[in-house]
Image (cartoon, rainbow, N blue to C red):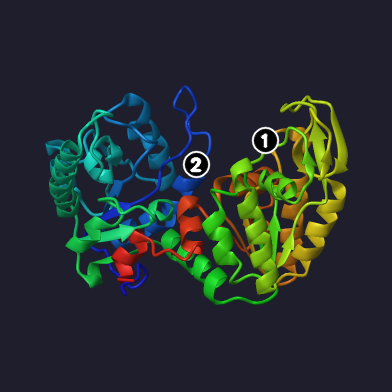
Amino acid sequence: MQTIDNFNFAEKKAFVRVDFNVPLDENFNITDDTRIRAALPTLKKILSDGGSVIIGSHLGRPKGVTDQFSLKHILAHVSQLLGVDVQFANDCVGEEAKVKASALQPGEALLLENLRFYAEEEGKPRGLAEDASDEEKSTAKKAIKESQKKFTETLASYADAYVNDAFGTAHRAHASTALIADYFDADHKMFGYLMEKEVNAVEKILNDINRPFTAIMGGSKVSSKIEIIENLLNKVNNLIIAGGMTYTFTKAQGGKIGNSICENDKLDLALDLIQKAKEKGVNLVLAVDAKIADSFSNDAKTDFCSVNEIPDGWEGLDIGPETEKIFADVIKQSKTILWNGPTGVFEFENFTHGTRSVGEAVVEATKNGAFSLVGGGDSVAAVNKFGLADGVSYVSTGGGALLEAIEGKVLPGIKAIRGY
């Protein structure tokens, strides 16, 4: 498989799929440019070789052309960070894009408009009536697939090489993340530096495990993590369940959880997972106490209590001090750590302590030789908020992509490059 380090981009044009889906405020100012900075090594390598780059990305989830999701809002910042006056094409597959891509000189860069302005990027028809017949749906799907092929061909025609550096979208079989790779031979398609690091980090977690291996799973819903939990039960020594999922597991075992978040239709599932953990010899670690509040607010009245004795009218918004100690002891003894999801509502300053304590334990374990992978939007936000990112082995930029990879799924964006 071709690698970006071994490829010489001199006099060549590269279509680089990045993930510049960054948060913007109401005045279109970037509030977190982490994803842009993450792609810089790949873009700079191509330019320093004497190549030129055509940058493709999405922003948000537009259902058509809208100023709100135009990539023109980030153009100046991309230019500043890249150190190049990046050109802009107002339409990713229009005549302007073709002309500007064709005219690119070595060392120059072009940013295409939001790829998702076109339904062809995702390959899903838009504008279908809710009551559309099966025949109408079938016709629309066939039409979008045909036009998607032309859309993909156009994007591929701009370049001599294809570089995928967008791990955050690697789980999508979209035109620019997977299908486009078919238009380049094996020597002219490759991962960017960020993608390489992401793939290597995931493979280390899944296939190169130093034990004990501990996974920390947070988040509000068991249903959204069921497949990853089941897959991890075949791999980990310890599985820590945190966040809102705590209360589904607690109620399933007969505990009183007050007004805490709970998936009542997943109580049997929680009991099933507890049983599977026992059968597989996995140490399933659940909270024993909680920091509770009388309303979902940073300013709420708070208290601590046993996790299975939360009074009516109160809800658990973070783990308690006993649970912090239990979690930390398990984490500090680990040699491989996967952390996905906070322990509570860390967005509220009064409920940050549990998540911070987990982060600090992960950092301490890492100092002692553990490999630690932090992934998922909230976990990444947490380690950044608490200044802990530099203390862990790797912080993944991929949310859904990371989860699907850990579930054991083959990601289209990865398969398109290396064939498996």
Would residue 328 be found to the left or right of residue 275 on screen?
Answer: right
10 Å crowding of disc 2: few (<14), some (14-19), many (20+): some
As drawn, 253 above or below 347 = below
Q: Which mark is residue 407?
A: none
Give coordinates of residue 22: x percent, y percent: 46, 39
Answer whether residue 340 is visible to the viewer in this image: no
Q: Pointers 2 and 1 in contact (CB under 8 A)?
A: no
Tell which of 255 and 379 is nearer to you: 255
Count numbered badges in the picture.
2
Tell which of 249 and 107 is nearer to you: 249
Answer whether residue 205 is visible to the viewer in this image: yes
Image point 33% across, 32% down: which residue? 62
Q: Which mark is residue 33?
A: 2
Outermost residue on the top side: it is 27
Image point 30% across, 46% down: which residue? 56
Give coordinates of residue 108: x percent, y percent: 27, 49
Camera-near label (2 vs 1) is 1
- Label 1 residue SS: loop
Query: Tag 1 or tag 2, which sits nearer the N-term?
Result: 2
- Label 2 residue SS: loop
| Amino acid type, mark 2 | Asp
Image point 25% across, 29% down: which residue? 131
| Amino acid type, mark 1 | Glu
Image point 73% across, 45% down: which residue? 251
As drawn, 331 above or below 298 = below
The residue pinned by badge 1 equals 347
Residue 69 placement: quadrant: top left
Give coordinates of residue 24: x percent, y percent: 47, 31
Quadrant assignment for the C terminus: bottom left
